[in-house]
Image (spheres, rainbow, N blue to C red):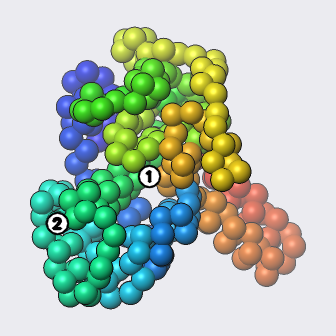
């Protein structure tokens, strides 16, 4: 899938077909029982597969298999719902919420975040200097601020992406594409030095940009690199000082280059 997307590639990008980086991201998760959706937040989702209220490991394994099939094989939400029903009946799970709503949240959230994380790997590998925010025209009830961000193009390492890299809310279908200066000009991108100031709000003591729903102010997939960096630091402690310093310098260099 091309990263520098011109008009001839938009239909392919919009289809959101499963791809290797997306599948690998989801396969790298560990099942984790949680009682409510706030038990783990933001980048913690990069390492953990959770379904709020699902505490039994057998139930989580069955739900995980259903989501994995939906991602890896491009299965529809109707297919996922049949798998969900079977898993619920097998476990005797009395979940909260209406069935179609609950299945839609699980299905869409896992597909959209795994897609975003996989795309992040591709974007970083492309080394394209700018990223462009694209609002999805398929959303029935578009969020005004998300519409206003359509076309915003900033350096790929701009801090704005740390909080605004989509999806940025439940059901958000926005995306990011990497562009060269020539492509940005051809597409009529809004190349900016700084993004607009849309204000903030406070949720549970945390300051969150307007337009971003609680828990979504993070970059899906970025937490994996932080986890690898922490692992490298622990390994370096056990090595001779000089070798450990060289190893850490190498890890940090690759980490900076991938941003």
Residue 232 locus on image (x, y percent): 69, 69
Comparing labels 2 and 1, the label whose residue is closer to the camera: 2
* Closer to the camera in the image, 44 or 3: 44
Find disc 2 in the rendering and name its residue. Answer: 81
| Among the 4 quarters of the image, the one containing residue 208 | top right
**Above-or-below relation of 226 to 259:** below
Q: CA distance from mark 2 to mark 1?
A: 24 Å
Image point 40% across, 53% down: which residue? 113
The answer to which of 183 and 13 lies nearer the viewer is 13
What is the crowding at mark 1: few (fewer than 14 residues within 10 Å), some, or many (at least 20)? many
Answer left or right for 188 relative to 163.
left
Q: As drawn, is 168 to the left or to the right of 142?
A: right
Q: Quadrant of the N terminus?
A: top left
When asked about the image quadrant of residue 182, the answer is: top left
In the image, 34 versus 66, the foreground residue is 34
Q: Nearest the camera: 170 or 79?
A: 170
Q: Mark 2 vs mark 1: which is more N-terminal?
A: 2
Q: Secondary structure at mark 2?
A: helix
Pointer 2 with pointer 1, Cβ within 8 A: no
- Secondary structure of residue under mark 1: helix
State the residue position of label 1.
117
């Amino acid at each position: 899938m091309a990263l520098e997307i011109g008009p001839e590639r938009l239909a392919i990008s919009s289809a959101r077909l499963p791809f290797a980086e997306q599948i690998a991201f989801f396969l790298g998760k560990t099942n984790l029982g949680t009682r409510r959706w706030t038990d783990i937040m933001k980048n913690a989702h990069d390492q953990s597969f959770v379904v709020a209220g699902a505490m039994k490991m057998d139930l989580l394994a069955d739900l995980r298999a259903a989501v994995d099939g939906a991602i890896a094989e491009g299965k529809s939400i109707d297919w996922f719902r049949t798998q969900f029903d079977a898993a619920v009946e097998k476990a005797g799970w009395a979940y909260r919420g209406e069935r179609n709503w609950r299945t839609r949240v699980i299905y869409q959230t896992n597909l959209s975040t795994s897609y975003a994380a996989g795309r992040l790997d591709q974007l970083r590998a492309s080394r394209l200097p700018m990223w462009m925010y694209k609002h999805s025209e398929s959303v029935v009830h578009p969020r005004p601020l998300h519409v206003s961000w359509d076309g915003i193009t900033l350096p790929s390492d701009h801090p704005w992406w740390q909080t605004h890299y989509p999806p940025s809310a439940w059901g958000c279908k926005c995306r990011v594409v990497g562009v060269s200066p020539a492509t940005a000009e051809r597409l009529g991108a809004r190349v900016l030095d700084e993004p607009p100031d849309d204000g903030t709000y406070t949720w549970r003591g945390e300051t969150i940009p307007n337009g971003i729903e609680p828990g979504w102010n993070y970059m899906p997939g970025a937490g994996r690199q932080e986890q690898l960096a922490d692992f490298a630091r622990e390994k370096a402690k056990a090595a001779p000082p000089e070798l450990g310093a060289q190893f850490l310098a190498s890890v940090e260099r690759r980490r900076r280059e991938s941003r």
